[in-house]
C-alpha cells in the first residue's frame, strides 16, 4: 500500500506532467494530488462495497502520518524534474504543512473519539457530518474552478481531461496487477487498489488557494475537482465489477442495493462476537452442571490434603513390617521342597 500510494502514483503523475508538458498551475496541483495521502472517503467506498474496511482505515491513518514526509519529498523531487527553480521557489510550503496538520489532527480526533465513545448513535451522526462536509468541499471546489468566465471546466481542452484522469486509471490498473501478483486476499486487493488512487484532494485545493490567483487559480482548482469526479466514477465501476467477480465480502448474487446497503463485514463481526458469547455461556453452564452432578462422597480439599500427608506414614508402616516369611511345601515323609 505504501509503495503504491507514495511511489507508483506520484511517479505516474510526474510522467503525465512531463509527457503532456502541463503548465505550472495544472502541473504543480496535479503533483500535489498524486502525492497526497489517501482520502477519508476511501473508507466509505470500502464500507459501501464490502471490501476490507479495517485495512482501509489502517492504510488511511498510516498514509496520512507518512505524508508529512513523503508529500514534500515527492513534490520537491518531481517538480524539480518537471519545472525550473522559480516554480519550486513559488510553492507555499507553509500552506502545505498547515493543510497536512489539519488533516492529521482531524483523523487523530476522529480515532480518539471513536476509541473513547463506544456508541453506534455517535458514529452514525459523525459519519453524517463527515459526508456533509465532503459534499460542501466538492461544491466549493466546483464553484471556484468555474469562477473565471474564460476557464469553465467543461470548456477546457483535451489535455486537461486526459492528464487529470490518467494517474487515477493507470494507478488502479497497476495496483490490481501488483496485489494479484503477491496473492493478497481478494477483498484486500480491492481495498489496496482503492487506497492507491483515492486521494485527499482537499490538500491540493488548499495549496492551489495559497499559491495561485486569477486565471491560474481557476485552472488549478479544476484539477482536484475533476480528479474527484474521475475517481468517483472510476471507483464506482471498479467496485461493481469487483463485487460481481466475487472479490468483495458481499455475495455476488444479491441485488446491488442490498450489497451496498448491507455491511457484511459488520454482520460477520457481530455474528462472531455472538458465537463467542454463546460459547462462553455454554462452557459456564457445563462447568456448573458438572459440579452439581459430582460425586457427593468425593473427598473435600481438606480431606484430600490429609490423605496426602498421611500417605508417607502408611508407606513407612508397611516397610517396617519387613518381608513375609517364605512358604514351604513339605512332601509326606520328606524334607522341605
Image (cartoon, rainbow, N blue to C red):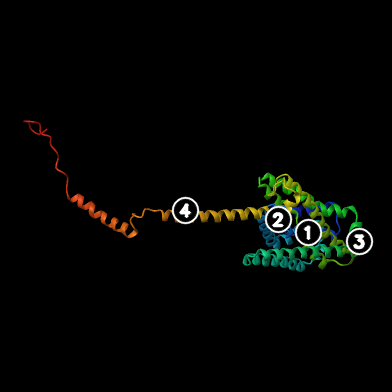
Residue 297 vs 326, above or below: the answer is below
- Location of mark 2 (residue): 47
* SS for dot 1: helix
Q: Which of marks 3 and 1 is nearer the N terminus?
A: 1
Nearer to me, 170 or 84: 170
**Alpha-carbon distance for marks 4 and 1?**
60 Å
**Alpha-carbon distance for marks 2 and 1?**
23 Å
Nearer to me, 37 or 44: 44
Residue 18 vs 88, above or below: the answer is above
Q: Where is residue 93 drawn, in percent x and y? A: 76, 66
Q: Which of marks 2 and 1 is nearer the N terminus?
A: 1
Q: Where is residue 125 drawn, in percent x and y? A: 71, 65
- Location of mark 1 (residue): 33
- Location of mark 4 (residue): 286
Task: Check disc 1: other Cα within 10 Å, few if <14, some if 14-19, many if 20+.
Answer: many
Q: Where is residue 303 drawn, in percent x and y? A: 31, 58
Mark 4 or 1: in front is 4
- Residue 283 falls left or right of residue 21: left
Asked whether the beta carbons under mark 3 and mark 1 sit within 8 Å of each other, the answer is no
The residue positioned 81% from the left and 62% from the top of the image is: 138
Mark 3 or 2: in front is 2
Residue 28 appears in view: no
- Location of mark 3 (residue): 151
* SS for dot 2: helix
Residue 164 vs 119, above or below: the answer is above
Q: Earlier in the sequence, mark 4 or mark 3?
A: 3
Asked whether the beta carbons under mark 3 and mark 2 sit within 8 Å of each other, the answer is no
Asked whether the beta carbons under mark 4 and mark 3 sit within 8 Å of each other, the answer is no
Q: Which of marks 4 and 1 is nearer the N terminus?
A: 1
Nearer to me, 178 or 45: 45
**Alpha-carbon distance for marks 3 and 1?**
20 Å
Amino acid at each position: 500500500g505504501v509503495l503504491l500510494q507514495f511511489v507508483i502514483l506520484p511517479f505516474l503523475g510526474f510522467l503525465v506532467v512531463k509527457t503532456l508538458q502541463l503548465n505550472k498551475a495544472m502541473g504543480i496541483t496535479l503533483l500535489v494530488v498524486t502525492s497526497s495521502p489517501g482520502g477519508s472517503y476511501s473508507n466509505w467506498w470500502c464500507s459501501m462495497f464490502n471490501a476490507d474496511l479495517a485495512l482501509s482505515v489502517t492504510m488511511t491513518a498510516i498514509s496520512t502520518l507518512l505524508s508529512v514526509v513523503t508529500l514534500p519529498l515527492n513534490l520537491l523531487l518531481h517538480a524539480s524534474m518537471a519545472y525550473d527553480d522559480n516554480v519550486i521557489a513559488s510553492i507555499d510550503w507553509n500552506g502545505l504543512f498547515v493543510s497536512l496538520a489539519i488533516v492529521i489532527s482531524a483523523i487523530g480526533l476522529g480515532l480518539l473519539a471513536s476509541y473513547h465513545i463506544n456508541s453506534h448513535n455517535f458514529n452514525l451522526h459523525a459519519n453524517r457530518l463527515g459526508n456533509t462536509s465532503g459534499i460542501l468541499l466538492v461544491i466549493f471546489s466546483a464553484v471556484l474552478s468555474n469562477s473565471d468566465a474564460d476557464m469553465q471546466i467543461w470548456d477546457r481542452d483535451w489535455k486537461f481531461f486526459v492528464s487529470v484522469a490518467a494517474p487515477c486509471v493507470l494507478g488502479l490498473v497497476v495496483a490490481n496487477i501488483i496485489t494479484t501478483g503477491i496473492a493478497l486476499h481478494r477483498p484486500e486487493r480491492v481495498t489496496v487498489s482503492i487506497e492507491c488512487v483515492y486521494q485527499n484532494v482537499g490538500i491540493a485545493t488548499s495549496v492551489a488557494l495559497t499559491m495561485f490567483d486569477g486565471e491560474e487559480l481557476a485552472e488549478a482548482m479544476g484539477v482536484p475537482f475533476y480528479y474527484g469526479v474521475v475517481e468517483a466514477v472510476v471507483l464506482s465501476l471498479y467496485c461493481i465489477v469487483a463485487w460481481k467477480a466475487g472479490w468483495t465480502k458481499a455475495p455476488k448474487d444479491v441485488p446491488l442495493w442490498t450489497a451496498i446497503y448491507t455491511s457484511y463485514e459488520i454482520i460477520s463481526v457481530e455474528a462472531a462476537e455472538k458465537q463467542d458469547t454463546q460459547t462462553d455461556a455454554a462452557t459456564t453452564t457445563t462447568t456448573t452442571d458438572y459440579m452439581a452432578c459430582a460425586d457427593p462422597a468425593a473427598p473435600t480439599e481438606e480431606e484430600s490434603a490429609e490423605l496426602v500427608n498421611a500417605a508417607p506414614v502408611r508407606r513407612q508402616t508397611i516397610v517396617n513390617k519387613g518381608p513375609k516369611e517364605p512358604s514351604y511345601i513339605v512332601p509326606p515323609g520328606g524334607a522341605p521342597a
